[in-house]
Image (cartoon, helix red, strand yellow):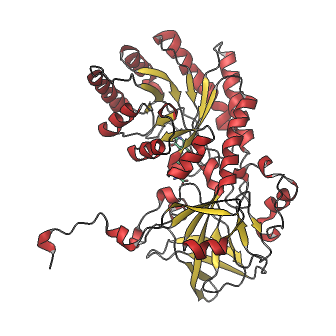
Amino acid sequence: MTTVLPRLRAETITANSLKNITSSLDSLSPNQQLLPLTAIVNPRDRLEIGGCDVVELVQRYGSPLYILDEVSLRTACQQYRDAFTKHYQGRSQVLYASKAWSCLAVCAIVGAEGLGIDVVSAGEILTALRAEVAPSLIYFHGNNKSVDELSYALESGCTIVVDNWHELKTLDHLTKEQSLSTSFIEPRIMLRLTPGIECHTHEYIQTGHIDSKFGFDPNEIEAVFAYVSESSLNCVGIHAHIGSQIFELQPHQDIGGVMVQWFKLAGEKYSLKFSELNIGGGLGIRYVESDDPPSIEDWVKTVCAGVTDAFVTAGLGLPKLLCEPGRSLVGSTCVTAYTIGGSKTVPDIRTYITVDGGMSDNPRPITYQSKYRAVVANRMSAPLSQTVTIAGKHCESGDILIKDIQLPETNAGDILVVFGTGAYNYSMASNYNRLPKPAAIIVEGGESSLIIKRETREDLLRQDCLPERLRK
Ligand code: LLP
């Protein structure tokens, strides 16, 4: 049993610190922690993650730097897997929603932990395949898959989660064309349906309400089932995803009850023998102290109870139950280290402290007004003496990473570490203002390894072309 000592500053990390003193790492739900599970303050008064001193990591790999804690990621995968084994009598499969962070190392780890992968583009399919995830465990989503992407997914043997009529018909057509070829593999598909379940989260990341661009509208379902039953597509089940960063359990409790009626209808009226039910992802994580997400186990337990109740009541056998978490698997496992530059005090208003990254490596604050917590990693026990605003370096006033955070006195060159940056940070990163994307490393047992190289200035020009007539 590993305990997390000495303690992180109580003022900054309160609830977790106290919990961690007595808990072993694998009993903590990573999504409920502000920091990765292995985070400690070392005797040099610095933040250490995975047995590595964060300040030394920045000296070695440069700044800004994404630092992924392998123990946290594996623990989250195991908790999802084990919770299904414990709370569900039927078969189950957890898929990692790789849109949260699609890269070889993350896909390889989740694959090695027995998870499959949810992908939304040919790029994510390629990444999962190169990370040696079995095609039978890759599920392809998206509301406007191109013919090229569909063909690639079909050739690779992924399951396609069909989102709309256009896609259904294109796929049917492609399948008929390809069925003449000797290498033809009958495509496995699922149907994404809009369940009409509302949840409380940012409106940009709600997806299960009726006015959503994703999935078939409930009014169309009978027509869709009729079409599928006449087609050459092998439809194995249905899917719904209601949104992201959700703290309530009720919407996920309800999803089984909504989906079972369609499962039943498909079998009874259209002779479609569904075996799989995918209830999406959406469990939230703790970004700031006031966030209070359920644990991974409680979420799984709720989903399993809802689905079991609904299917038993409907007199149906339990389906193979799939879910596809992204944020709650990878979000809390990673931090971003920045180097502090200058500061500016606007009298009686605020002090801005600037870091060497911002909206290009973490677009979530400017996009969703997301809140984050941070510490000065090279002086962990210094008293919190000022309230400041952390500004990014981009030419955009909205490029503010954290508003009104309490920090110790800071100097240029200090290392600021922002927590909870594993999900939708690297994957949504851009080169705005032509900033190269930071490097990402993984840490475990005192060892660190590069998982994504830092982009160079030359990399930024790699795709640029200067037509001859424009040259001097
Ligand atoms: N399944 C489907 C079909 C999805 O659309 C999503 C997320 C997930 C699973 C995974 O949801 P999660 O477990 O990560 O909540 N960029 C936004 C989040 C967008 C989520 C998109 N879909 C953010 O930074 O908050």
In the image, is residue 130 above or below residue 347? above
Left or right of 423? Residue 86 is right
Q: Tell me the residue at 73%/35% (across/down).
A: 83
Looking at the image, residue 89 lies above or below residue 3: above
Asked whether, in this view, residue 72 is left or right of residue 276, the answer is right
Foreground pick, 181 / 427: 181
Residue 252 lies, in percent from the top left, at 65, 36
Q: Position of residue 169 (x, y in %)?
A: 32, 26
Image x and y of residue 68, in percent: 62, 59
Quarter location, residue 141: top left
Q: Is residue 63 left or right of residue 19?
A: left
Residue extending furthest left? Answer: 469
* Residue located 48% across and 75% down the image: 397
Image point 46% across, 28% down: which residue? 191
In the image, residue 224 sits, relative to residue 37, either above or below, namely above
Image quarter hosting the C terminus: bottom left
